[in-house]
Image (cartoon, rainbow, N blue to C red):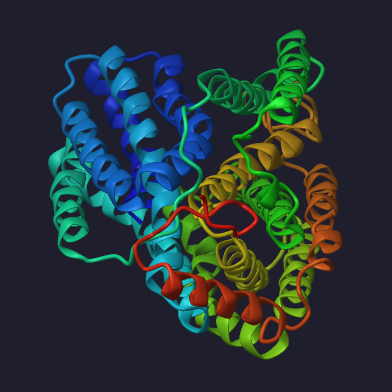
Amino acid sequence: MIVALDGTVLLVAQPDLQRDLGATLTQVQWTSTGYLLAVAAFLVIAGRLGDRYGHQRLLFVGVLGFGAASAGIAFAPGPGWVIVLRIAQGVFGALLQPATLALLRLVYPPGRLGAAVALRTSAIGVAAGTGPLLGGFLVAHLGWRAVFLVNVPVALTIAALTLAVRVPAMPRARSGRTDLVTAALFAAVLAVLVHSLAGVPERGWAAPRTLLGLVLVVCLAAGLVMRERRSAEPFVPPAVARSVPVVASMAILLVTSGGMFGALFVSTFVLQNSLGLDPLTTGLRVLPLTVLMVLGAPAAHAMLRRYGARRAAITGQVLVVLAIVGLSALGPAGPWMMWSATFAVLGAGFAVVMVTATGTVVGDAPPGYAGVVGGLKQTAMNVGPTLGIAVAAGTMPLHPSADVLPGAGLPASGPVMGTALLVLAALAALGLLPASLLPSRPGRDAGREGRRTLRRRRAHPEGAAVSGAGRRRP
């Protein structure tokens, strides 16, 4: 929640930060880009480290580091310091995210894990919804530095609770030396991918820098796959890579978050540039999405328990696709009530997808590998929005024309907006295929696996090392 809150309040603080430090537009952009690259690059690595050294330890280090970086940013004398410390904040933020998911797996039994995941989803929705309001209040009364100072007491409180809470011993992944070359390849692939996608709105898909970045991603990924296949202990264990529910859930999160955030990208600029709405009024139009995401998470958990992961995921996916198609049909002249209602459907559908896919990922993670699975899940959630915005930008004209607002580089007409949103709906619809691969009856399929996992934990309370196949190490 602290990570989600920090990301949303920064958007409001950036203009004040630029004026106070005399930063260029490029430097301001890098306060976000640097953080995003660091998080994307280190999520899987952080999950792997948690599986090896303990998720509670990683959470403690991550939250203290996040708070320390926030304090440093609050007293930064110039934009260069802010960028460097934001990158450090991203590294520590990467330590936090897989650890929280893995700890949920350790603390909650299979029957109650879904409720915990639903609560986590609601908390993220609350943070995303209140972040701009809190950021606006702090910036207006105390300045942009207060946005980062507020993280410090929150981080210290979480660190104290981390030490105070007793967590059951976890099955550990195989010990051994960390393959630094593989870790570096993972970080490089994800960082280059996110950087290339993040530049698409400005440069376009056909720009030499974009194409060069994507070619480099393919080359690095090929080298990573070859090294993983030859490794006796792959960074992503075969038990994870071959788990159909885990891989399908991550694919669902990737394309669904891409479709939704791409739709928000298009809709927000149309509401502001075409209809002339101010940011606050635009936020109020989109607010039903956040409200339904918060309220829909518990309902999604109930749907998951009653109808199973497959039906729940397909239902959520269909709602997301229909909502994006509905936005494409509205156009700039659509009634505001219809805009709000469509955003509400989008939020409800995304809540169902989030709760179902996250619960499946965490619940089906092989024993000893909850951290690396959580890291992969969070990576999908970080790459997805960047991909969605890149796809949206690729379907819009990036040069001034009759359909584009002067100087904005973004479409104002209904046809251009509708085309972009239909492409994003098609992107989200790709999630229907992996959704059909999820367990049809979690009470029997996933629940049976969860009961086996519980029996293994009780049989080895000392946290004996367990391999990806569930065998005890000799």
Which is more toward the observer, 62 or 224?
224
| Residue drawn where x is 33% and y is 26% of the image | 88
- In which quarter of the view is residue 27 placed? top left
Image coordinates of residue 3 in percent, x first then y, are 36, 47
| Residue drawn where x is 23% and y is 66% of the image | 166
Q: Quadrant of the N terminus?
A: bottom left
**From what the image shows, is residue 23 above or below residue 338?**
above
Q: Quick check: can you spot residue 22?
A: no
Which is more toward the observer, 26 or 270?
26
153 left or right of 121 in image: left
Image coordinates of residue 209 in percent, x first then y, are 71, 10
Image coordinates of residue 281 in percent, x first then y, are 47, 57
344 left or right of 321 in image: left
**From what the image shows, is residue 420 above or below residue 231?**
below
Q: Quick check: can you spot residue 36?
A: yes
Which is more toward the observer, 181 or 355?
181
**From what the image shows, is residue 153 above or below residue 445?**
above
- In which quarter of the view is residue 244 placed? bottom right
193 left or right of 66 in image: right
| Residue drawn where x is 35% and y is 41% of the image | 12
190 left or right of 84 in image: right
- In which quarter of the view is residue 316 placed? bottom right
Image coordinates of residue 62 in percent, x first then y, are 29, 41
